[in-house]
Amino acid sequence: MNRNEEYRKLRQELDQTPPELEYTLTRAKAKADRHTLRKRLIALPAATLTALLVAFVILVNTFTSFAMAMSELPLLSDLAAAVAFSPSLSAAIKNEYVQPIGLEQENNGVTMRIEYVIVDEKQLNVFYTVKTDRYEELWPHRPTIALPDGTELTSWSLMGGAFDADKKANDIRQFTIDFLAQDVPEALRLSTEFYEIKSELVEVTPVNEWQPATTPPSVVSFDFLLSYDRDLVAKGDILQLDQTIQLGDQTITLDHAEIYPTHLRLNLKDHPDNSAWLIGLDFDVIDRSGRRFSGIDNGINASSISPDGPFMESHRIESPYFSHSDELTLLIKRATFLDKTDQRLKIDLVHQTADRLPEGVRLKEARQTDQGWELTFLAIAYEENHRYSLFSSTYYDEAGNEYDYPVSSQVTATETIDDQPAFQTSFLLPDYHQDTVYLTPHFSRYVWFETPIAIRIK
């Protein structure tokens, strides 16, 4: 019997009153109608209390599934807390769309245990714990997946490897593996290393004290052969759309939508005459009851496998799968474009000017240091606590030579642009001392729709 069969049997047995407790429960219910909980506990005869305890011990020691329930149920509540940020995963747990796994390995004084998965045809969410008395904090480094025989997989992305200071050592953690062009394999090999994070390593280093980014050495590694019950995977709902629309001055075709338990995908087609690539799409879906499904706050929002430029062909929002609505309406609120002429933006570092910058972005300062040029930009925060990336880490000099800065930018939120809340981001171009630089922006401009474009998709 595998873990899923045990889980289903467990739930069935928990719905039945064990014979050992039938008489005791009847007496307890009768007392509940006449007394408060406190009085009932005081008045409970010693013999009955003893019978309850004996029956409980018998159940735990006789019925494996009951013992499993007593140990697993608290973890389910931990799992629900771990995905509270995700309406889709929370709905999956509420609808019992979760598979217990229970794979465990121990290595070098560290125990890693894969507890559960939430999996559909296109996304695999792996929930695991890491326990150790040997290290202060352990976080994953370079997690990878492959087929069981070691064959590499293509067109996938994985999130969940970054350090999160809010997580405690024994909390449930998560990998989200998103498959772009293929379905989730029936089995795969999940491998990851872990490195130790000590308190002094997570302190923010001022930009003017920049040092090359380094990752502590790995202290332990794990390699799991992970499989799940394919029969329990819900089939996605494919909605063919084939509708061409105008987003400002650009033409986009809504090809089809895919609805899975973990997310909704809206898949698009570009037009060859467009002068800009669609980079982002801000949209909601509303069901018949008016319930709104919006963008994913902490996860994968868009993806592409297109070789023709940075056009993002697939966009994600939270899933309406468990609403079981027979009517869904798409509401497009904003489109983000990268003009094809804006793939490199020139910054005059000496005079602190730019030919052009992305919409809502300002160059605040360019300061030369012994370590290189330090750049500071301001960007409008269109939503509360909203931060976004302005440029890629790749940049060029006047001769076209390519560079890369291996350090994350620092972000603060104490500025304004045209009386709008803004955040400040700073980064260093290490060992770069030339007078000009060409940055590669993530976007050029927005197209806003005061009245959202409404399209019935189901």
Image (spheres, rainbow, N blue to C red):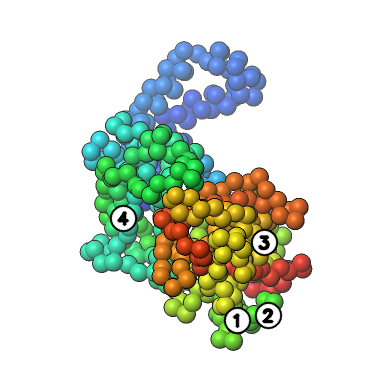
Q: Which residue is mark 4?
A: 190
Upstream in sequence: badge 1 or badge 2? 2
Distance from disc 4 to disc 3, alpha carbons, whole Å, reads 41 Å
- Name the front one of labels 3 and 1: 3
Amino acid residing under circle 2: Asp
Q: Which residue is mark 1?
A: 275
Distance from disc 3 to disc 2, alpha carbons, whole Å, reads 19 Å
Q: Which residue is mark 3?
A: 360
* Residue lying at 41% horizontally and 61% vertically, measured from the top left: 404
* Residue lying at 55% horizontally and 16% vertically, measured from the top left: 41
Residue 70, compared with residue 343, is above or below; it is above
- Name the front one of labels 4 and 3: 3
- Name the front one of labels 1 and 2: 1
Q: Is residue 213 visible?
A: yes
Upstream in sequence: badge 3 or badge 1? 1
Whether tag 4 and tag 1 are in contact, CB under 8 A, the answer is no
Q: Name the foreground residue: 42 vs 371.
A: 371
For numbered disc 3, what is the local secondary structure? Answer: loop
Residue 167 in the figure: left or right of residue 29:
left
Amino acid residing under circle 4: Leu
Q: Which residue is mark 2?
A: 249
In which image quadrant can residue 347 be found?
Answer: bottom right
In which image quadrant can residue 143 be found?
Answer: bottom left
Upstream in sequence: badge 4 or badge 1? 4
* Residue lying at 55% horizontally and 24% vertically, measured from the top left: 28
In which image quadrant can residue 348 be found?
Answer: bottom right
Q: Is residue 68 visible?
A: no
Whether tag 4 and tag 3 are in contact, CB under 8 A, the answer is no
Amino acid residing under circle 1: Ser
Whether tag 1 and tag 2 are in contact, CB under 8 A, the answer is yes
